[in-house]
Amino acid sequence: MSAATTRSRTPDRLCAEAVDLARAAAEETAAPSVVGEHVGVVAEGDRVVTHLFECREPGYRGWHWAVTVARASRAKVVTLDESVLLPGAEAVLAPEWVPWSERLRPGDMGPGDLLPTDADDLRLEPGYSGEDEPPPNSAVSHEMADLVEAEDAEVTAGPPAGLPVAPGRGSVAAVAGELGMGRARVLSRYGLHSAADRWEEAYGAKTPMAQAAPASCVSCAFLVPLAGSLRQAFGVCANEFSPADGRVVSLAYGCGGHSEAAVMPRPPKPAEPVVDETLVDPLPLRSDDSDSASASGEDLGHS
C-alpha cells in the first residue's frame, strides 16, 4: 500500500483554525467586499488545508475563493500556499471550447467574412488545373510533340521540316480552361451528396410547402435547371413571389407560385338581358277596341 493511500483526510487542526489568515489572503487577492462567509474546509493532504469562502462578485454566482494553507512537519506556524477563485457545484461556467470550424453553421457568414477550406476537406477533391504534366499519350504531351516533329521531318521536305518543334497546339492550361477544367479542386462525390441532402431537406418533397403545393417544380416555368448531374434533381427558383426565390430547390418541391397551377380567370360575361332595351318596339297609335267602336258609330250614322 502506497504512502498516499495511508494519509489521513482529517484536516490538520492548526491549518483548519487558520481562517483569519486565509480570509486576509483572499481579500488581498480580490477585495474585502467580494469575499463572503467561510463555507468549508477541505483536507488536501498531510498538513495541507484549503479554506473556501463565498464569492460575492457579480456574475460569479456559485464560485468561491479557495485559499490553501500548510505547515511543515513539527512546526506550529501555518503559512500561505495559494489563493484562487474556483467554480463550485452550482457555478455558471462557459461552455466547452469548440473550434470555429465545428461551430460554423450555414448562414453565419456575413459581408466581408472569409471561410478558408482545409487541404483535406472531404467535400473537395483534386481537379485538373492545367499545371500538371499531361499524360504521355495526350495530344499536348512532349512525347507526342516529338513524334509529330519526327513525322513532319520524314514526310515534309520543305520548310516545315526545319522547325525546331511541332506546330503549336495550345497549352495545357488553355485547353483545360476551354473545357471548364481550370480549377485546382472540384466537388467530390461526398460533397455532392451532402449538398444534395441539405437542399432536399430544406426545399424538398417532404416540406410542408411542397405537401400543400398544387404541382411540383419539375413542370414550373420559373425553374432554372442546374448544370451537370445535379440538373437531374435540382434547379433554381426564379419566381420573385415564391418563398424559394433564388434558392436551389428539388424538382419534387412545389409552392403556390407554380406557373401552371393557377390561371387568371377571364372577365365574367354578362347574361343575356330579359328585356332588350337596345331595340325599338313598334306601337300602334290606337288600340283595336277604339277602332272597332269608331267603325260601329259610322255604320249607325249612315243607317
Image (spheres, helix red, strand yellow):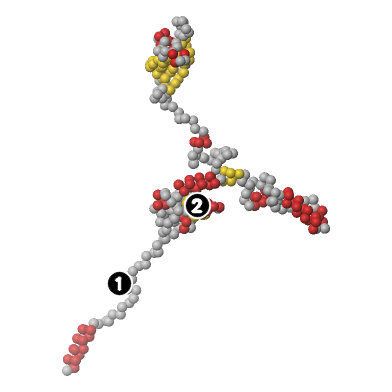
In the image, 216 versus 296, the foreground residue is 216
* Picture quarter with the C terminus: bottom left
Residue at 44 percent of width and 59 percent of height? 260
| Residue at mark 2 | 234
Residue at 34%, 74% in the rendered image: 278
The type of residue carrying mark 1 is Val
For residue 276, what is the image quadrant? Answer: bottom left
Farthest bottom residue in view = 303
Mark 2 or mark 1: name the one nearer the start of the chain.
Answer: 2
- Residue 150: x and y in percent read 78, 53
Check disc 2 and report its element: helix, strand or loop. Answer: strand
Q: Secondary structure at mark 1?
A: loop
Observer able to see residue 231: yes
Q: Nearer the viewer, residue 257 or 49?
A: 49
Task: Say left or right for 292 vs 239.
Answer: left
Reading the image, the residue beneath label 1 is 274
In the orientation shown, which residue stands out farthest toward the front?
A: 1
Left or right of 164: which side holds 68?
left
**From the viewer's perspective, is residue 195 above or below residue 83?**
below
Residue lying at 80% horizontally and 58% vertically, measured from the top left: 156
Question: Please, what is the three-letter code of the amino acid marked with disc 2?
Answer: Phe
Q: Nearer the viewer, mark 2 or mark 1?
A: 2
Where's residue 10, x and y in %? Answer: 40, 13
Task: Report the residue at 45% width, 53% height from top.
Answer: 252
Which x, y percent locates residue 65? 43, 18
Q: CA distance from mark 2 to mark 1?
A: 57 Å
Q: How many marks?
A: 2
x and y, in percent, of residue 282 in the image: 30, 80
Q: Alpha-carbon neighbours of circle 2 within 10 Å: few (<14), some, or many (≥20)?
A: many
Look at the picture and state if 77 lies above or below 31.
Answer: above
**Dot 1 alpha-carbon crowd within 10 angstroms: few under 14, some 14 to 19, many 20 or more:** few
